[in-house]
Image (tube, rainbow, N blue to C red):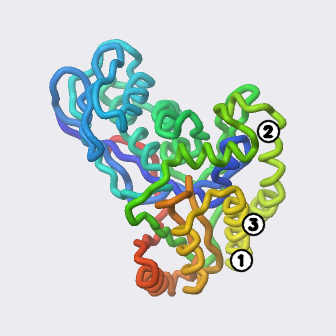
Amino acid sequence: MEFSASAPCKAILFGEHYVVYGSPALSLAIEPRNAVKFSDGAKGVNLKSALGEGRISGGGRYIGQREISLYAEVARAVLGVGKMPDCTAEFLPAWKLKGVGTSASLSAAFAAGLYRLKGENADAEMIFAAAQAGDLVAHGGRASGIDAKTVSHGTALVFQRSFSPLAFNSSEAVFALPDGTALLLIDTNVGKKDGTDRMLEIFASQFGIRVPPHEAKEEQRQKISKEYAPLWEKIESAMKGTDAETLGSLMDENHLLLKKRKMSSNGIEKAVSSAIAAGAYGAKMTGGGGEGGAALALFDRGSIGAAAGKITGKTGFACHIISLAKKGACVD
């Protein structure tokens, strides 16, 4: 028995951190894809990863490296707590980037493979539920659901979480980049990375929140939403069709909000300023932020390759021209 499952990565264009507390956000599913290779193995689900190894046995019991314990939650969500299949799952991330939803993407690919082993034809929402269970562990209980939704469905999404009752609402976004433009992803990681769970805690603490989002007071969540709402109104209008200058300006505005809330870093600021100097219409952090985080910049398609070379030459940061995904998590 040998097969692979895969899922795209994601890039949040607007709304990271605010989305955790109920604000809407726009997220893009992007390539390349992360993969999980399944093969025959000893008793239980044996996990192999660059972060270490582990095993999920009957009852969903996990033994192994703490950093990959999130996949036990994915297995429990798909298979319950009964007998586990005997197999080996090898996790093969395409990128080693912060801010592109790697934990959600690998969780979604793992879930798709487990559903095949279970003999079920899982849809995107079934895979999302399992991937979200793993992503909650990865993000210290604060994952909004946007990463898992985006990589499971494999499209551009408008996502908004509600709390009474708790629900993860999403719809396929009617969105396209202005003609002749493309997005550049800038990886600021040069060795030190702040975990997304830490950045989520820093964001929450500025609003007096020290509990998971669903336990926060409604007035605390409303204060966060109120700060972001004027920008989202402009974004909604721009999604119906806008020029590059306007979209770039909105990216700049979103970045300033996140910077105000201490989500940026010296590396991200260097990436943003270098992108603007290289001719970007706008640039912003994407994902969790902090040291080692990623930035997005909007360029003319004809000049984006030269701009990437300038940015790398000035900062040493790797640059990737984004390709939009064509499908969500699935067995390949």
Q: Amino acid at mark 3?
A: Ala
Mark 3 or 1, nearer chain start: 3
Which quadrant of the figure has residue 108?
Answer: top left
Please identify, in this view, whether the residue under mark 2 or under mark 3 is nearer the observer: 2
Q: Which mark is residue 243?
A: 1
- Please tell me whether residue 146 is drawn above or below residue 11 in the rendered image: above
- CA–CA distance between discs 3 and 1? 8 Å
Q: Residue at x 49, y 43 (%)?
A: 152
Mark 2 or 1, nearer chain start: 2
Q: Which residue is mark 3?
A: 238
Q: Amino acid at mark 2?
A: Gln
Q: Quadrant of the N terminus?
A: top left
Q: Which mark is residue 280?
A: none
- CA–CA distance between discs 2 and 1? 35 Å
Mark 2 or 3, nearer chain start: 2
Asked which secondary structure carries label 1, the reply is loop
- Please tell me whether residue 278 is drawn above or below residue 67 in the rendered image: below
Please identify, in this view, whether the residue under mark 2 or under mark 1 is nearer the observer: 2
Which quadrant of the figure has residue 217?
Answer: top right
Q: Residue at x 49, y 62 (%)?
A: 324
- Please tell me whether residue 62 is drawn above or below residue 265 in the rendered image: above
- CA–CA distance between discs 2 and 3? 28 Å
Q: Which residue is mark 2?
A: 220
Q: Residue at x 45, y 53 (%)?
A: 9
